[in-house]
Amino acid sequence: MHRIIVLDSIAQEGLDILDAEPGVEYDVRTGLKGEELRQALSEYDGAILRSGVKITPESVAGNTRLKAIVRAGVGTDNIDKPAATRQGIVVMNTPTGNTVSTAEHAFALMMSLSRNIAAANQSLVEGRWDRKLYMGSQLAGKTLGIVGMGRIGREVASRAKAFEMRVVGYDPFLTEEQAMKLGIEYAATVDDLLPQIDYLTVHTPLTPETTNLVSKANLDKLKPGVRLINAARGGIYDEEALLEGLESGKIGGVALDVFPNEPCIDSPLFGRPNVICTPHLGASTEEAQTQVAVEGIHLLINFLKTGEIRHAVNVAALDPKTLADMKGFLNVAHRLGVLLAQWHGSGISSVSLNYRGEIASKSTQLLTSAFCAGLLENALEEEVNVINAEVLLRDRGIDLVAQQHHEMGSFTSSMTVEVSGADRTVKASGALLGHNMPRLVMLDDHRLESYLDGKLLIFTHADVPGIIGRVGTVFGQHNVNIGQMAVGRAGGKPGGRAVGVLNLDGVPSQAALDEVQAIEAIDHVCVIELPPADQLPAWLQN
Ligand SMILES: NC(=O)C1=CN([C@@H]2O[C@H](COP(=O)(O)OP(=O)(O)OC[C@H]3O[C@@H](n4cnc5c(N)ncnc54)[C@H](O)[C@@H]3O)[C@@H](O)[C@H]2O)C=CC1
Ligand SMILES: O=C(O)CCC(=O)C(=O)O
């Protein structure tokens, strides 16, 4: 049974899907924070929220159950993504569900500013008929600057054009050619845009580059009387600069839907003439809320039931077909990780992966994560999976490089991993027989073909006659059954070094191992435990 926690109020249509979904149970628990939130999250597999809840590092600390957090909306700035990633939690959002509603809200703010709708309404209901006081300004013929020409910015642009406005856009990903196609003018920088515009609206995330995009330092770049709208994130305009600009008359009006700290019920901007504020209502329409709730719930259910990752903001996307297609090789990668962690031992400082053949054209990033998960999982207290493995590995100062070679080697697809550190370098190659039989096909420089499951005894030795028989005799005397056996020679040539890999039915006693180690031609003996053949890590089980 997958358990889902709904942390903010979401549209009933989303809850209806949860009600109808077999194998899923959910609770709506809003208003949680601090320890109560941490405790609650540890009891669920998935969580869905809007902007009303903050997921901090403390909220997910020690959580080994939660696998996914879905933001029913666009901005994931209320979720500490590095903390979620470290904890192995995928964070997804619903990027398109509220685009049009938010664009409409920004537009509504711009129109209300132009025609003093809010103040005129207030004055009238207070008993005044102030027609002179609320002289407005027409939008047609005016210039609108849009910073952030993503989904919402583009919707605002097309509406502004319908209102016969001239539109100038800036976005680091906007080219002159794209601007032309959109029927707008291109600005190469924000500074180029500011002096030309009568209205400014921003549709970017809050980043170091967008913080204080309008500040005291650049107020003088603005046209006198400019009207500013922000329905993106609080902090993109410096509120003190807005106050200064309003007071001096440089700024003709300000409309804000978002604030640096929300909820915000007190601000020096509230109640000022030419200022309109709404409490983060951009996405608050029935249509947008239905869409983000339905989409968000589907994302969560699909992830929990099939492993599908869509619209993730902290990991690469993974569709069910790719996952099914790569499952066998992900299993190989994970098992190689578990094997090399034990074959190398402690002190690993670098890992180098090489993908060869057909697999090199697939999502090798995911295979690398699966390998890292295997390498780390027995060493770490915390839960390791494909979401957090690479971060956890790099956190430990381990260098990681991966290369792809599209030409085939001896196998249609294979991967080779070299692990170094503490004056030791070990290497292993894995391949897949059929679609679900992982095989070890090289260990250090020894070619072989060994099963990659259960209990292995690996021993390196001089390539001389009689070694295999003597090892078999020792295990026979100690009642340890050998299920499979593979041997390989360094460079494939006789008379040099060789390796033996035995798949055992039980773990040999120390006495048996001592006897094997005592055989003069044998120099290194190591017992390695891999997952049984039919056991997949939890993150591969869907
Ligand atoms: N008020 C509300 O209720 C809502 C607010 N939002 C906010 O609106 C913002 C935009 O949302 P979408 O258009 O859906 O996102 P988007 O990802 O489609 O577009 C964002 C655009 O900002 C651009 N950008 C990033 N850094 C920039 C910079 N330094 N200068 C100029 N452009 C930059 C990106 O290149 C991208 O094109 C988000 O921050 C989101 O959180 C979204 C939905 C509802
Ligand atoms: O959930 C909400 O209403 C806020 C929407 C929003 O800001 C977003 O989607 O980024």
Image (cartoon, rainbow, N blue to C red):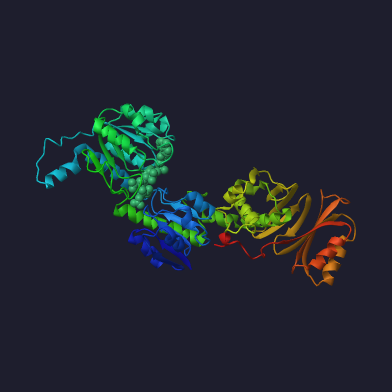
- Residue at 24%, 42% in the rendered image: 276
Residue 157 visible in the snapshot: no
- Residue at 79%, 70% in the rendered image: 480
Give residue 41's position: percent from left, percent from top: 46, 61
Give residue 394's position: percent from left, percent from top: 60, 47
Vertical side of 42 occupied by 243: above or below: above
Which quarter of the rendering shows the C terminus? bottom right
The number of numbered badges drawn on the structure is 0
Is 282 or 490 nearer to us in this picture?
282
- Determine whether, in the image, residue 392 is placed left or right of residue 46: right
Give residue 393's position: percent from left, percent from top: 61, 50
Is 61 or 522 nearer to us in this picture?
61
Give residue 157's position: percent from left, percent from top: 32, 37
- Determine whether, in the image, residue 17 is placed left or right of residue 328: left
Residue 391 visible in the snapshot: yes
- Determine whether, in the image, residue 164 is placed left or right of residue 64: left
- Determine whether, in the image, residue 257 is placed left or right of residue 366: left
Q: Quadrant of residue 105?
A: top left
